[in-house]
Image (spheres, helix red, strand yellow):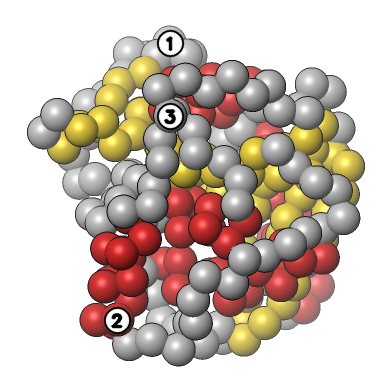
Amino acid sequence: MHIEMRHSFDLNEYEQQELQSQLRQEIRIPDQFSLTPKVVAGIDLAYWDNQAIAIVLAMDYETKEVLEVVHHQATVSQDYIPGLLAFRELPVLLPAWEKLQTTPDLVFLDGNGILHPRRMGLATHASFFFGLPTIGVAKTSFAREYPEPELAAGSIQYIQDGAETLGAVVRTQTRVKPVFVSVGNRINLESAVRFALHFVGKHSRIPEITRQPDIWSRKLRKQHQ
């Protein structure tokens, strides 16, 4: 898959924050999203020591059949800094993305989108390299406090910053912990939640489009450790 290399990763912390603020001006969230995807990609990373492995998995939207899985392993060049995860993960993720032969219509990432202090979580930042709509599905919330949805599967509450809606707290299975869905770019929250719920199976609260890459990343990590 093609990548539009938007910037270098040889930046200090201040430069990274400034770049996030600049890219934020290019985020586009449509009022309506009419695309029904045929192929969707899911992305996850696993870490050990100073190494990371990125998985990009293509899945048929309707059947949920896994069509292709590619990966890339690399040495991690940046420590984890809250709010700057994309600068740690994208240098590992992008070479894996380039190996993908199947063309997706939509991309899910294990992480946040605009649910982020500068509205530039991993799913949003990655969209500028992919040129595709992206969705963030996180297991934990970036927000310290959030409203709890009802206990029934499909229940939703929204995370607000004043008048701005940053994400949805989604109960994907009855009486289990929720996941946190946010827009990455080029899609609206209503569609992001709908697509995330479409991929929820019987075995996990995590949508299969991000669960399967997570399974693959942990399996490959064991082989390399």
Please report whichever mark, 3 or 1, sits nearer to the chain's N-terminal start.
Answer: 3
| Residue at mark 3 | 30
| Residue 152 - label | 1
**Element type at marker 2?**
helix
Of 86 and 18, the residue lying toward us:
18
The structure residue drawn at horizontal position 48% and vertical position 14%, both measured from the top left corner, is 153
Pair 3/1: label in front: 3
User: Can residue 20 be seen?
Assistant: yes
Q: What amino acid does circle 3 point to?
A: Pro
**Residue 67: which quarter of the image?**
top right
Coordinates of residue 68 in the picture (x, y in percent)? 87, 49
Q: Is residue 64 above or below residue 127?
A: above
Q: Quadrant of the N terminus?
A: bottom right
| Residue at mark 2 | 15
Please report whichever mark, 2 or 3, sits nearer to the chain's N-terminal start.
Answer: 2
**Element type at marker 1?**
loop
Q: What amino acid does circle 1 point to?
A: Ala
**Element type at marker 3?**
loop
Pair 1/2: label in front: 2
Coordinates of residue 167 in the picture (x, y in percent)? 34, 34
**Residue 95: which quarter of the image?**
bottom right
Q: Quadrant of the C terminus?
A: bottom right
The structure residue drawn at horizontal position 77% and vertical position 78%, both measured from the top left corner, is 224
Taking the image as shown, residue 39 lies to the left or right of residue 161, namely right
Q: What's the CA distance linking mark 3 and mark 1? A: 29 Å
Coordinates of residue 147 in the picture (x, y in percent)? 22, 26
